[in-house]
Amino acid sequence: MAMTVVRPAAYEVVRRLDLSDVSFLVEVRDPDVARAARAGQFVMVMSHAGGERIPLTIADFDRERGTITLVIQAVGKTTREMQRELRVGASLHALAGPMGEPSRTEGVRKVVCVGGGLGVAPTYPVARAFKQSGAYVIGVIGFRSKDLVFWEDEFRAVCDELIVCSDDGSVGIKGLVTEGIAQAISRHADIDELIAIGPPVMMRGCAELTRPHGIRTVVSLNPIMVDGTGMCGGCRVRVGGRMRFACVDGPEFDAHEVDFDDLMSRLRRFRPEEKLALDRWEQGCRIAAPADVPSG
Ligand SMILES: Cc1cc2nc3c(=O)[nH]c(=O)nc-3n(C[C@H](O)[C@H](O)[C@H](O)COP(=O)(O)OP(=O)(O)OC[C@H]3O[C@@H](n4cnc5c(N)ncnc54)[C@H](O)[C@@H]3O)c2cc1C
Ligand code: FES
């Protein structure tokens, strides 16, 4: 009798955790990507056949389980759709990667790893990689308030020191991550490098803070990406006066060379289209939902 081999579905969601009303974590089965993934890399994902391809950072990978972890903020149509559909047992339609250049950790003796908001997730594997390469790691993680804190324990496990910041002072020190960085710099005169991942305005603030101290500073840029393979030019960023493609030349770049104004204006370019797509999707959801008609 022929034996039936039951293969686990490709890109199946094996774990889901809601971190807040607008952010969630999914652990997805993909042994090949899990085997090849390195800190700092990302994947291109399609949640269903007619969906948009979007880039998401590999926030963690487990080679034994053959899984990668994605932490997603539901900001528009595609990510809202994923928040609704990606439950345990569901599968992504397509996943390609790992993409981008891995973080460079060699030769750094003391590093500050800064994550702001959702940027805490992609900073985690970078901090871990620095720790594994023998660096002294100072973590600085920032949230708007205590209820949005996630992965504090994970960070503590890979950092020699951890500074938690919150905008409203409900946890850690009151202030932006730049407050935490200033503390770290005042305590350590021998910081070799700082890496910051978060909203562009935060990354620019970090770059301006470290510039007078001459601390090499790296940021992971998040321009709009279409193919993720260097073909479309959609992810052009201006760095050191030159055009670079974030998907293949980055996503990490020297923060002191990045033109953040150009990045932010490019990110705003498709706002009307993005709003229209979200409105149409929400309207479709309302029509599809059965009306709550009282009986009798
Ligand atoms: C290298 C990289 C890694 C990223 N990692 C993560 C991550 O780990 N978690 C996460 O939540 N988000 C991540 N993002 C951002 C994420 O891709 C966008 O939030 C997502 O594409 C928004 O799609 P949407 O349809 O939900 O929202 P939309 O309403 O279409 O867009 C909302 C905003 O997201 C940005 N955006 C839209 N389309 C894209 C696109 N194709 N590529 C990049 N940005 C886009 C724009 O700034 C836009 O204004 C990453 C982006 C890059 C470039
Ligand atoms: S996403 Fe197309 S060139 Fe980078």
Image: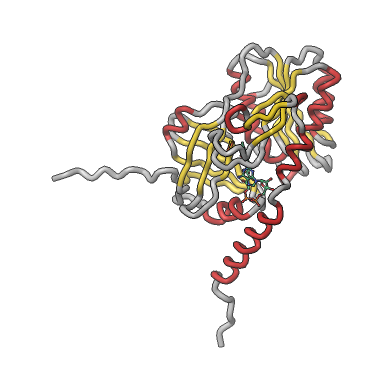
Q: Is residue 170 left or right of residue 248?
A: right
Q: Residue furthest bottom?
A: 296
Which quarter of the image is occupied by the C terminus? bottom right
Q: Residue at x 80, y 26 (%)?
A: 181
Choose between 150 and 177: the one closer to the eye: 177
Query: Quick check: which quadrant has ligand 2?
Result: top right
Q: Residue furthest left?
A: 1
Is the residue 94 above or below the residue 213 in the image?
A: below
Horizontal and vertical percent position of residue 283: 62, 67
Q: Is residue 186 left or right of residue 271?
A: right
Q: Residue 190 lies in what quarter of the image?
A: top right
Q: Is residue 203 left or right of residue 19?
A: right
Q: How is the image coloured?
A: secondary structure
Choose between 272 and 174: the one closer to the eye: 272
Q: Residue at x 71, y 44 (%)?
A: 267
Choose between 238 and 176: the one closer to the eye: 238
Choose between 242 and 162: the one closer to the eye: 242
Q: Residue at x 33, y 43 (%)?
A: 7
Horizontal and vertical percent position of residue 240: 74, 24
Horizontal and vertical percent position of residue 271: 71, 52
Is the residue 196 above or below the residue 81 in the image?
A: above
Which quarter of the image is occupied by the N terminus? top left
Q: Is residue 128 left or right of residue 139?
A: left
